[in-house]
Image (spheres, grey):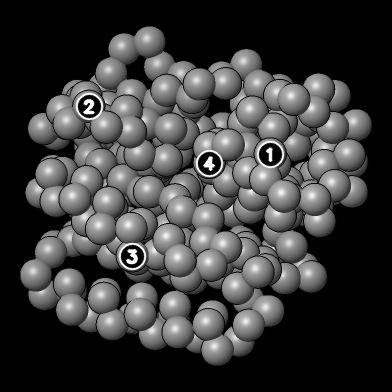
Amino acid sequence: MRIRYSSEKPLHLSSLYLRAASPHAELVEAILNSINRNKELLNDLAVVAQYDLSSKVARKVKGNVKRLIKQLRLKERKLVSMSSGTELMGIVTYYAIEELLSEHNLYFYLEPEVLNIEKPFDYALIDEVNNRVVALVEVKRLLSLENLPNYMKDFMNKAGSIHKNCDYVILHLHITPEITKDKRTHKLIEILKEAVNTALNTLTNIRIITTHINKDRFNTFKNTLTKEIKPYLTKKQ
């Protein structure tokens, strides 16, 4: 498998010191093993990973949660604990781009710590052969436009301190059904993404990508993410 989720020692990659540091490594391993036995689990996981399960909005995915708990053989409180961060979304992301990782000989680092700046990202794409950090990625699950300005501001501050040390720094905005059902708002976010990427293209290597799911669940997520992230996997000139 091309996923790293727990590293005792950091790797020296170019000018960065980085290690995979999942806070729930044993649970991640159990989930990966279950998914490898039954890839259908990714449909429910893609739905559930969009939410902090302790929030009221997550009530609408209770059926998916119950199926996951049964299939993964986990206690609900453990799944809820993981959902407060983006580990579950990271696992879904890994499987969505698993083929791309093999194609480009890259590895997926879950919850990586960048020791140079003492700040974590949500996932990283690493070329271990050439000691190259292809992308450091911050994930934000977007339920409304209310928090988007703060998400953008915080990400740009973090990216500004590290972007010269890797090929790309990416803000991965996952657009939840609360937004996709409003086509005008969804379109507005896509226009914003294109405008920001166009403006940054000649200045820096900071980018924004978006994903969403619909009734096809995991396959929709996989298709949108593959289209969005593929251009950033080849070596930056």
Residue at image point 58% right, 36% down: 84
Query: Which disc number belongs to residue 118?
Result: 2
Amino acid type shown at disc 1: Ser
Q: CA distance from mark 3 to mark 4?
A: 19 Å
Q: Which residue is mark 3?
A: 149
Q: CA distance from mark 4 to mark 2?
A: 18 Å
Quadrant in the picture for the N terminus: top right
Residue 176 found in image quarter:
bottom right
Task: Indicate whether 24 appears above or below 41.
Answer: above
Query: Which disc number belongs to residue 86?
Result: 4
Residue at image point 31% right, 45% down: 136
Amino acid type shown at disc 3: Pro
Residue at image point 63% right, 76% down: 180
First of labels 3, 4 by sequence position: 4
Residue at image point 54% right, 80% down: 186
Q: Secondary structure at mark 4?
A: loop
